[in-house]
Structure formats: structure tokens, C-alpha cells
Image (cartoon, grey):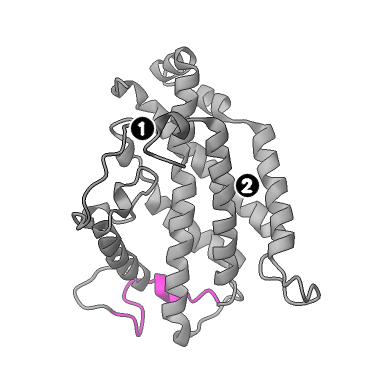
Amino acid sequence: MDFLKPETVLDLQNIRNELVHMEDTIIFNFIERSYFPTCSSVYLENADGLKIPDFDGSFLDWALMHLEMLESQIRRFESPDETPFFPDHILKPILPSINYPKVLASYSNQVNYNSNIKRMYIDKITKLISKNDGDAKESYGSVTTIDIKCLQSLSRRIHFGKFVAEAKFQKDKELYTDLIKKKDIDGLYQNITNSAVEEKILQRLLIKAEVYGVDPTNKEGERKITPEYLVKIYKEYVIPMTKEVEVQYLLRRLEDST
């Protein structure tokens, strides 16, 4: 996806191709997470053994915030497809800024679902992809590192709904303008939903999990990711939240003159 070429960014087929690529990233991150137990202590504020002076939040929050501060200095969050979990702590880049052409509406950065994504990941997804429900103090750092990878890949995928929404708006401005003026949320959901595409995604994930989730040289070995769980994660969490992002983006679309 070349964000310096806006005419390619809002092509729905290009967007779908990018989403397919993201699936692989998410699956392999989940597989890496599957080597560890849930380690719920890293998600708790002031957990025993993980208390951080002068910081109100979990060990995961602390690590993620400081990583984002570093990444912001190398321009990560200037890219239109990146959304920070701690936007109030983003620093000015050391590298020269890139003048990306405007593709999304001016308020797009305000459509930030990362708090919901983090809650969903901790409360729902970790229980499905972890090795077991347990703790391993020696693995807190490793678990936090891979959790951040999982969160960032999920965030990018879900917030890509803004590009989907913009592409659909540009394709049929009259229809979406009417729905937005009426604040017809049900109508927006109906028009952004493509059941055939969603079913194709789920079928593709089922196949990928079957192939990627086990060592091909030892197919009788331990499975690292369960296909049914991966489908459940996308069907019940990732796809619905992506559509929430699309609708919230569209509801404000008439604020912008683009």
C-alpha cells in the first residue's frame, strides 16, 4: 500500500489485498503468543512484582507507552495506517516528516478504537490463544513484547476500516450522504456489510490456521493455533469492530469537504 499514491489507496481491491497480508501477520503473532500462558499479571495495575514507580497502569501499558514514544520519533504515527494507543504521549519525529497526500477525512485520527481493542484482546483473545491459563514470572517480558505485536497488528487491521469506509463513500457519495444526514446507523451497517466477502475471509482463515498452526514436518505435533478459535476471533471481534470503526468514521464524514 503506497500512501504517496492516493489513487491506489482507496481502491477496494488494493485494500482487500492489504487485509489479506495483515491476516498472516496476525496469525503468526498469535502463534508466537501461544508459547506462553495467559500471564494476567502483566495486565493488572500495580500487580505484585510489577509495580512501576510514578506510573498508574499495567506493566503492558507502561511498555507499550514507552515503545510508542520511541516509535513516534521515527515517524511511525505519521503514517495514515497507524493509530497510537497513547496519543497524548506521542513525540515529535527526529526524522523529517513525510508529506502524505490527504486520503482520509481531517478528523480520522479522532476515530481511535485502541482502548476497546486492548480490552478485547486482554479479556477475550488471550484466553483463546495462550498456551494455558496460568502465570510464568520469568516470561513477563516476553509475553509483554509479543502482546504489543499482537495489539499493534490488530489495531492496524481494525482501523483500516477507515480506508474501507472512505472508499465506499467515494464510490457512492449520494447514498452515503443521505444515510449520514438521516443518522441511519442501521442503513450504514447494511451498506458497508458484504456477507460474501466476510465468509470468504473466514474460510481463508480456517485454511491458513490449518496450514500455519502446526509444524509441517510433524503434523502429529502440538497445534499452535486452533482454526475454530481464529475464525471466532475474526467473526466475533475483529470484523464487528472494524465495521464499528467504519460507521463511526462515516457518521462524521460530512464534516469534511474532501
Residue at mark 2: 235
Q: How many labels does the image show?
A: 2
Residue shown at 36%/45% (left/top)?
Answer: 112
Q: Position of residue 39 (x, y in %)?
A: 49, 76
Is residue 184 among what the camera can see?
A: no
Q: How far apart are marks 1 and 2 (CA)?
A: 26 Å
Q: Position of residue 65 (x, y in %)?
A: 29, 64
**Of residues 64 and 258, the one drawn nearer to the viewer in this rendering:** 258
Q: Does the magenta stretch include residue 44?
A: yes
Dot 1 falls on a residue whose secondary structure is: loop
Give the magenta range.
37-51
Q: Where is residue 33 in the image (x, y as percent from the top left)?
A: 55, 70
Q: Is the magenta stretch mostly helix, strand or loop?
A: loop
Location of residue 164 with respect to 220 vertically, above or below: above
Location of residue 73 with respect to 135 vertically, above or below: above
Residue shown at 57%/39% (left/top)?
Answer: 16
Q: Position of residue 250 (x, y in %)?
A: 41, 28
Q: Residue 172 carries which label?
A: none
Residue shown at 42%/76% (left/top)?
Answer: 41
Amino acid at circle 2: Lys
Residue shown at 40%/32% (left/top)?
Answer: 6
Label 2: few (<14), some (14–19) or many (≥20) C-alpha neighbours in 10 Å: some
Circles 1 and 2, Cβ within 8 Å, touching? The answer is: no
Residue at mark 1: 104
Task: Find residue 240 and report its image quarter.
Answer: top right
Quadrant containing the C terminus is top left
Location of residue 236 with respect to 58 vertically, above or below: above
